Image: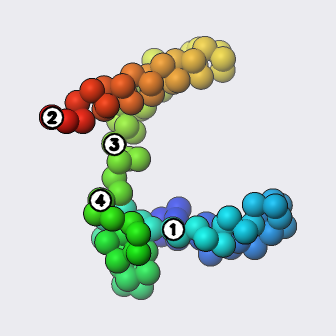
Amino acid sequence: MCDKGCQYDVNLLARFKVQFPDLAPLIEHLVVVINKLHLQGHKEDCHIVKAPQLTKGCGRTDGEGVERPWPHSNETAKITQDQNPGHRKDTFDDTNADWNYRKQVTMGE
């Protein structure tokens, strides 16, 4: 199994050097990790090289924070499929802002 992090990390720097040469120095410092839930389906090499808990400066995270809003976004997608692109973007912006607000309000619980 391969994750987007594994796929794009392979040639990412080379692509940036061609398409965005001014940003390539930043990409040289980029460290791609795979969240713990997805890491289970990867090759053994990934368990060492891409594991957040073994990555310097990563801290103690499961890396799933970016995945948690997906079910919420999927529900929004169902109700916006007939909207024009502008209205659809506004609706997604609003629902994402609501998600972030509720996350901040309940963070201490």
Label ID, residue 62: 4
Q: Mark 2 against mark 3, which lies toward the viewer?
A: 2
Gap between marks 2 and 3, in whole Å? 17 Å
Q: Mark 3 sits on what residue?
A: 68
Packing grade of label 2 (10 A; few <14, some 14-19, many >=20) is few
> Disc 3 on helix, strand or loop?
loop
Q: Which residue is mark 1?
A: 32
Task: Reply above or below: 84 against 55.
Answer: above
Q: Earlier in the sequence, mark 3 or mark 4?
A: 4
Q: Residues within 10 Å of mark 3 (few under 14, many from 20)?
A: few
Q: Position of residue 54 (x, y in %)?
A: 35, 77
Q: Residue furthest left?
A: 109
The amino acid sitting under disc 4 is: Asp
Label 4 and label 1: CA atoms lie apart by 14 Å
Looking at the figure, which quarter contains the N terminus?
Answer: bottom left
The spot of residue 95 in percent (x, y) is 44, 22
The mark closer to the camera, 1 or 3, is 1
x and y percentages locating residue 51 in the rendered image: 37, 73
If you read the primary sequence from the N terminus, does the residue marked by circle 2 or circle 1 appear first? 1
Residue appearing at x 39%, y 22% in the figure: 98
Badges 2 and 4: C-beta atoms under 8 Å apart?
Answer: no
| Left or right, residue 85 beside residue 1 | right
